[in-house]
Image: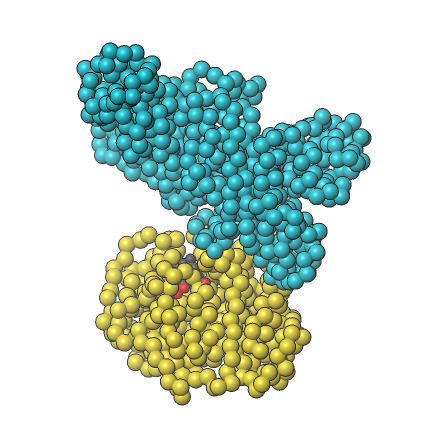
Chain colours: A cyan, B yellow
Amino acid sequence: MEEGFKEADVVVERTYRTQVQTHMPLETHGVVVDWNSDVMMIYASTQNTNAVRNEMASVFNLPKSKVRVVCDFMGGGFGAKHSAGSFGPMAANLAKKSGRPVWLMMDRKEEHHSEGNRPNSIQYLKIGAKKDGTLTGIQQRSHGTAGVALGAGVGRIAQILYPCPNFATEQYDVLTNAGPGAAWRAPGNVQGAFGLEQAIDELAEKLNVDPLSYRNQIDKSEVRKVERQRGAKLFDWSRRQPAGSDKGIVKKGLGIGQSTWPRFVTLDSSVEVKIHNDGGVEIRSGVQDIGTGTKTILAQVVAEELGLQVKDITVNIGDTFFPVGPGSGGSVVTGSITPPTRNAAFEAKNALLKLVAKEWKTDSSELFIENGQVSSKKDAGLKMPFKEATKLMQTSQISKIASRSDDYGGFQQPWGLAYGDLGSVQFAEVSVNTETGFVKVDKIVAAHSCGRPLNIGQLESQINGGVIQGVSYALYENRVMDKGTGHMMNANVDQYKVPFSMEIPEIETIIVEEYSALSSTDAYGIGEPANIATAAAIANAVYNAIGVRLYEIPITPSSILKALNKVS
Amino acid sequence: MNKFSWYEAKSVEDALEQVNSTVSEELYQATDKAAVFKSGGIDVFDWVKEGLLKPQKIVNIRNIPDLDKISYDPKKGMSIGSNVTLAEIASNPETKNHYWALHQAVNHAATPQLRNMSTLGGNIAQRNRCWYFRSADHDCFRKGGARCFARQSETGENENHAIIDNGSCVSVHASSIATALMAFNASVVIINGKGEKKEVTMDDFFVTAGKDIAMENILQAKEIITEIILPAPTKNTKSAYIKQVARESYDWSLGDVAVVFEVSGNTCRSASIVLGAAAPVPYRSMEAQQAIENKTINSENAFAAAEAAMKIARPLAKNGYKVPLFIATLKQAILEIS
Ligand SMILES: Cc1cc2nc3c(=O)[nH]c(=O)nc-3n(C[C@H](O)[C@H](O)[C@H](O)COP(=O)(O)OP(=O)(O)OC[C@H]3O[C@@H](n4cnc5c(N)ncnc54)[C@H](O)[C@@H]3O)c2cc1C
């Protein structure tokens, strides 16, 4: 490490601070448990039906077959809803005792206090570079508190975003008597990016190069290179002026922030595809749709494989009586569940085509389905509607189950099951009122990649959501805790601030397709990547506007006016 | 939330018969035997839901006939019944034409949904904003407790709190509409249990924390607001209102100002300047008024008046930003008049 800094001509050494952000989904944590029959029935607001089932089976010493978890729709989950919590067993015990279904949902205060938060961070960062910009050393030391839980690190972003020969990190968890931390949309990385991406900007300024050009030099990712190019064009990066040079009372500023997220997969991801003898097609899996549109893309994949329309496919998911699905965390769902879905559909299709081949006295490899018709590659005259074909079945259904199972594609890394990176680059335009201290985010251009995009509308929705949460993190959210009494003072939806319609900037998305051909869909998630770079890009834009850097979020009128030396 | 009985008041007399306390009195004494007024119910039920107010009876005055009238007369001015909703004031053309600052204040208060529910009487009688005052976990002076948590120098979370007159309590008045009403020299009509009627100016309606920590206004048990009266403007009356909030969509004021001037040409002949969210009650800045009266309305004089207003500010550890915020906002509001 020391060697690295000895070689350095310029060094940036700073401490960055990020706040505690408490989970505030519209639907709080909770369950309804009905334990009147042999099977414990749990209706859960969860990101992980499978984990809740396993936890409850283990707590009550039941076989997994006697616990059923159902989650048809979710009122929001951003990382904190992966477990049965303490409320699950409580409700189950009460259901047993009372012989009645028990409804147990957190109220808003309980949700803020006890159901998870993004831990804070105090990050020391030292980065050295040679005159020509070559990075020589990155040293990181962070402290954070996840209250009575663990997980206050700042992720791997400083380690992997820009390759550097000398890297060291120490990340400390400080235990306090406060509500527990939990996963939250790209845990650790959002905090880490806030520090790193500001430090890189500052380094670029010391080296006297444009921060975007500097990233072109030190960032080895091909996908981010394309994202920077396309983003800079759409955003018109060329209009960026030197920091603090805008004249008026309200100053404009432009900034950039980058991030990476691995392509995680969960191998224990299974799906059943059924073709019924009346032409109906059904998908079944334990995987839940937490509002991201998983149901829609599963139908799309099967429809594509079977040559049908999306409306022809019925999706029954979010039920542990079906094959085990992945949890909605790590942005794994799309990458884990769509390949087996296609594979199951493929097998079901082949079984059906075999029946048609028998009828037509030909080989099934010559047959295909398109626009709802079974056809032959050899004989254009042969046609049979899909529905007719299903009548050839001797049983009432064809059922095929497929799993992601073995690690094709080589996702296994020494530190986890992930492959490559989902690169993101975001651009922020802000206005800062130098008299009142108010910051308005005017625009975000968000360039992202997630392999093969399956549904553009849903992807853009996820990116919009990630950006809005990033704006929220940069400017609004903050757990205010009275140090004297240990109480959270703003445990409600009014004083715990999140952006509403007027605070949401114009958001333009760029989706860069990047194929790696490592699965039958080549698709990956976007939920978390969309959230990582925003706060850093905003902080860099604020600096560009006023010429004074803020090392702490949320950025508020108070912090701006202090930075401008207007508060005595 | 505790159980309480509900009484549907049929008339002002009927309501005064039923009521035996005020929200302020009950929050201070916690007898759990109170019968209190509820109009729109927004503020009353916030206290009930927090478990701080446990009324025995809610006297619903929302449906009393004739308290929901709004009228304007060029000579007498405007009368707004206590049950008129904020939404009704917001869409009233006379308010917009003759009381611009009030129109602005109402339109920037709370949210459209809340404005549909909230009444003007309830709005000016709502209790103060301070997250310690409004928390069941913190027994502060205003609730009869022994401490001001917000003031504690090491631990107080006082970023939203008062910078003026904050000696005994650092909360801020919640009504951003009162800022504009006071600037227009509005008055409040109150009827008591004996049927006596009095009219007090906004300046006299509010009670500073130094005078009585238990309340922010003069209302006693068995007193009801029936209307709010705004004097008629002259053709030389001009006004402006600006509210600073963390979020534009809706938020509580971090600092709001209402300015009502009598002008001749571009000169201010007489000034009425009120600051909201600066002190525990809406604060009339005599200093700013004096600084701008008989002066040309220009950038320099506006700034001087704004600075004069902040001379007496004594910010706490975390709300120093409010001083430059008020200076910028008041300057801007004065300039909007020119
Ligand atoms: C999220 C949120 C944001 C808000 N933002 C703002 C804002 O920006 N600006 C602002 O000004 N306000 C704001 N408010 C406050 C809101 O406007 C008030 O709570 C509301 O106006 C109260 O009116 P009400 O009719 O519901 O009163 P109630 O809750 O019914 O009554 C309030 C108090 O007045 C008493 N009372 C009511 N009517 C009379 C009467 N005729 N005579 C005597 N006493 C009476 C009651 O006993 C009670 O003590 C906000 C509220 C919320 C929840």
Depicted A396 relative to depicted B256: above or below = above
Picture coordinates of residue A299 (x, y %)? 34, 30
Say left or right for A502 vs A321. right
Relative depth, front residue between B121 and A445: A445
Q: Residue furthest bottom?
A: B75
Rendered-image quadrant of the N terminus of chain A:
top right
**Vertical placement of residue B228 versus A451, above or below:** below
In the foreground, A77 or A205 = A205
Q: x, y percentage for residue A208?
A: 76, 43
Find residue A303 and report its horizontal and vertical position in percent: 33, 28
Is residue B296 visible to us here? yes
Question: Between residues B322 and B162, which one lies in front from this camera angle?
Answer: B322
Give residue A27's quadrant in the image: top left
**Would you say residue A316 is visible in this rendering?**
no
Ligand 1 visible in quadrant: bottom left
The structure residue drawn at horizontal position 31% and vertical position 32%, both measured from the top left corner, is A309
Residue at 45% across, 48% down: A491
Please give left or right for residue B92 compared with residue A450 in the image: left
Which residue is at the front of the view, B152 or A162? A162
The residue at 53%/35% (across/down) is A512
The residue at the point 56 percent across, 33 percent down is A423
Left-right relation of B128 to B303: left
Question: Which quadrant holds the C terminus of chain A?
Answer: bottom right
The answer to which quarter of the image holds residue A310 is top left
**x%, y% of residue A416?**
53, 22
Tally of marks? 0
Above or below, B36 against A344 in this view is below
